[in-house]
Every structure is written in C-alpha cells, then in structure tokens.
Image (cartoon, rainbow, N blue to C red):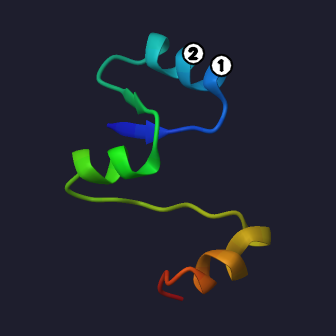
Amino acid sequence: MSFSLPKARTAAELSERSEGVHVCAYNQEVVDRSEVVIIAVRRQARSRAVGCGLPR
C-alpha cells in the first residue's frame, strides 16, 4: 500500500508502524506505483476536486 501524506511526521510514524506500507513523497509517485487509486476528499474540498476533473 502506498500513501502520500502532507505531514512528514505522520508519514514517518505510519511507515514505521505498518509493515508493507510505503509512504511516497509525491502523489504522482503513488499513482505510478499503483494499479488502483482511491482518492478521498473532505467535503469542504469537494468543489475544488471536482473542478480539477475528478468525476462527480
């Protein structure tokens, strides 16, 4: 499983605690490493995400 997290401390803690988890520096790296991508967006950011071309 690969993630990209905006907070370096959270990313480091997650990768240390969880075997098989890879924390990527950039979102593009996550996409490049993945067969399936799940995008989670907070309700407050939904309109910006949809405006970026994500399906509604």
Image height of 6 relative to 41, above or below: above
Residue drawn at 29 percent across, 23 percent down: 20
Image height of 43 relative to 21, above or below: below
Disc 2 residue type (three-letter): Glu
SS class, disc 2: helix
Disc 1 residue type (three-letter): Arg
Which mark identifies residue 9? 1
| Extreme-right residue of the structure | 44
Residue on which disc 2 sits: 13
Which mark identifies residue 35? none
Kindly report which numbered mark, 1 or 2, lies closer to the viewer in this rendering: 1
Residue contact at pointers 1 and 2, CB within 8 angstroms = yes
- Crowd class of label 1 (few under 14; some 14 to 19; many from 20; radius 10 Å): few
Position of 11 with respect to 29 (left or right) is: right
| Extreme-top residue of the structure | 16
SS class, disc 1: helix
Image coordinates for residue 9, horizontal then vertical, percent: 65, 19
3D distance between C-alphas at marks 1 and 2 = 6 Å
- Crowd class of label 2 (few under 14; some 14 to 19; many from 20; radius 10 Å): few
Position of 7 with respect to 13 (left or right) is: right
Q: Which one is in front, 53 or 18? A: 53
Position of 25 with respect to 28 (left or right) is: right
Quarter of the image where the C terminus is located = bottom right
Residue drawn at 62 percent across, 64 percent down: 41
Residue drawn at 47 percent across, 86 percent down: 55
Residue drawn at 70 percent across, 63 percent down: 42
